[in-house]
Amino acid sequence: MKSLQIFILLISIVTVTLSFGQEKFNYKFLNDYSTKEVPLEEKTKLDHNAPTNHITVIQKKALHFDKITEDWKQVDCGVLYNLKLSENYITWVLYYYWGEELHTTLVNYDLEYNFIDSEQLAMDENAEGWTLSESTITRHRIHRMDALYIEPEQIEYINFIFKDTGEIVSEKEYYNGDIPDTCIHYFDPLAVKYVQALNGLNIRDENGNKIGKLLYGEKVNIIKYTNKELSVNDNGKIINGSIVEICNYESGYNKRRYVFDGYLVDDTALKLYNTQLCPNMLTEDDKDPFNNGERVCLDDIYSIILEKLPNSIPTNFITKNDNVIIEKGEITLPLTNGKKKTFVNNTKYLESTESYEYIGFLESFNYHLIAGSYFEEGDFFFVDQNNGEIKTRFPNYPHISPDKKTIICFYFNPYNHRSEFFIYTIDNKNQITLKRIIEIVYWGQNMENTEILWTSNLSFLVKATPIATMWESSGNYNKSYQNIHIKIHK
């Protein structure tokens, strides 16, 4: 009897040890989060509604963050929402911060919250947006876009499939490299073209059914020329061409489609239409913006036409100042007050880099013009010869009107392909005021030909290129342009 009691006691001790030896987590904290329906898009922005409701270390451990990021104990992590994808497993969308990056990840668990698999959905970084990922989630797949915004931008689309077990595998792996009815977008195409048709170009499947439209300026990868020739009567003009096979991205897939190549042109041949010159958005004004971001024609601000080279007025106001000292990595400006203003290049560390170039002296203003280059950005600015004070900064080279009462400046952001037109006014005391910032929808100043020719005190000629082809397919700046004549209205 005593032996039996000892045996029962030993069993009890083992049972208690197992109970306390295994980690038990309370998942009630997940009840505070919502469930979303698919399909949905997952995008994350560090500067817009970035999550701050971080979870504890114990909660991180319960959700197996150690299998998501190796720095899981140190970094801020959290939960975004639940997805109902399958009866076989549980799905949560989580987030974590890593340095200056915000990541969101889809994680599949079994019904007892054992980790099965995970895949990144979205990522944003706190610089100028060099890299970005975003996804569309469906019941069976993740369609993810990975972008690297350099010159030119590099965009890749990747598809992942949810297996019945909850594992997440690439579509290429799932189909053993042979994905039905798709093409590979990163192949070497036979030709790279752009859509010249103002109203877009119809896309058709192999049976001739219209399934979509390519917009003006869209890039087209031709993968095969067919023997189907076609002639189109476009308002009395006969357009000859043939049907070509292209690789077209549609909802997470690169599909083999067909278009008429009579409306496709090379990157250097894409032209602007008159109707595309005017649409723009007034993003900043000395008065309240009046169009709320709508694409309109700002007729009361300026008029704009395509025009051949007219007569121009010389405006060479900026000259060199022999008193300026330019040595190794330094620019020294002797000032009227007897002091000196020095700009020193700092290129030791990439993220804190500063380098300066002396452009010249504007005698009528008594200003020096200097160009600054910094990490992922740059500017031009005036320095007062009297006291070394830095005056107005410009996003690009400031072009001064013949009467020295107006400054115009064009800027193109290579990361988001945003084209802007800045208008400044100069009063009788040489005070410079930013009057307007206008976002241009279809075109920007040519990156290779940045000269402005003034035709009057309020009108000038700018060399313009469609935003879609600022770069050639080779990655070089597109040197082709059209002359645009702009007249600013007072």
Image (cartoon, helix red, strand yellow):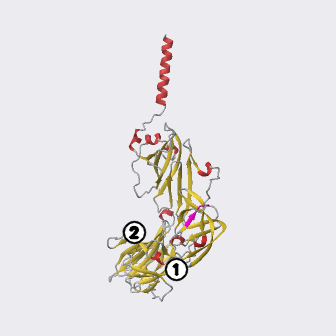
Reply above or below: 331 against 157. Answer: below
Q: In the picture, which quadrant includes the C terminus?
A: bottom left
Q: Residues within 10 Å of mark 2 (few under 14, many from 20)?
A: few
Residue 386 colored in magenta in the image: no
What SS does tag 2 mark?
loop
Q: Which mark is residue 482?
A: 1
What SS does tag 1 mark?
strand
* Residue 349 showing in the rendered view: no
Query: What span is colored magenta in the figure?
Result: 202-206
Q: 42 or 62: nearer the eye?
A: 42
Q: Which mark is residue 294?
A: 2
Q: Quadrant of residue 458?
A: bottom left
Instruction: Please provide percent x and percent y for residue 397.
Output: 46, 77
Select label 1 or label 2 by which is in front. 2
Name the residue at the top extreme: 1
Q: 249 or 13: nearer the eye?
A: 249
Instruction: Please provide percent x and percent y for residue 123.
Output: 49, 55
Q: Is residue 261 left or right of residue 282?
A: right
Q: Residue at x 56, y 55 (%)?
A: 158
Q: 143 or 407: nearer the eye?
A: 143
Q: Residues within 10 Å of mark 1 (few under 14, many from 20)?
A: some
Reply above or below: 290 against 83. Answer: below
Q: Amino acid at mark 2?
A: Glu
Q: Is residue 253 left or right of residue 344?
A: right
